[in-house]
Amino acid sequence: MNVSNLINNYPEAVAMILFGIGFSNLLLQKNLIKKIIGLNIMDTATYLFLALKGYIFQRKAPVVVDGITQAEHYVNPIPSGLVLTGIVVSVSVTALMLSLTIRLYRRYHTLDLDEITTRIRKEEN
């Protein structure tokens, strides 16, 4: 692996490491709140990566100033719009997951997913 490529692309590497941390947290944790945190870390890493890919050095926001209308002077606004839309969806999904977690806690008095699964199986029998 070429070290200069890693140095030039360290923000993308950070985004991938964050995604890995969130994914491993989502898979390995038994606590539902910790799983939700892991999913949010994954979301944040995705938004960071999209924002990094959408940014072009020495270009400005797509607002026409000083009569410059050529597209090569501006950053593409689509990745920014996708990030904003993703953040709104992520907040909604997080709110839904937290509300379901509260309901599970009120019913089973635990946040351990294995314990909840065991109690559900006992209820079915």
Image (cartoon, grey):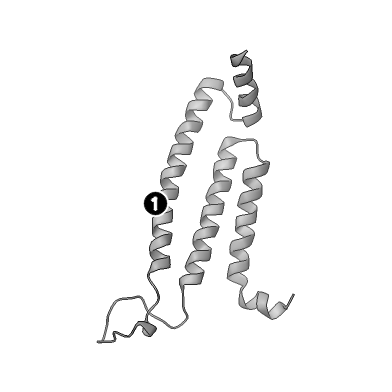
* The furthest residue to the top: 125
* The furthest residue to the front: 125
Residue 93 drawn above or below residue 11 = above
Q: Amino acid at mark 1?
A: Val
Q: From the image, tell me which residue sits under label 1.
A: 88
Give the image location of residue 112, x and y in percent. 62, 30
Residue 104 drawn above or below residue 3 = above
How many numbered marks does the figure carry? 1
Q: Where, quadrant-wise, is the C terminus in this rendering?
A: top right
Q: Is residue 78 left or right of residue 105?
A: left
Q: Is residue 39 left or right of residue 60?
A: right
Residue 99 is drawn in which quadrant?
top left
For the point 47% across and 67% down, the residue is 51
Q: Nearer the viewer, residue 43 or 121?
A: 121
Residue 33 drawn above or below residue 41 = above
Give the image location of residue 5, x and y in percent. 66, 78
Q: Residues within 10 Å of mark 1 (few under 14, many from 20)?
A: few
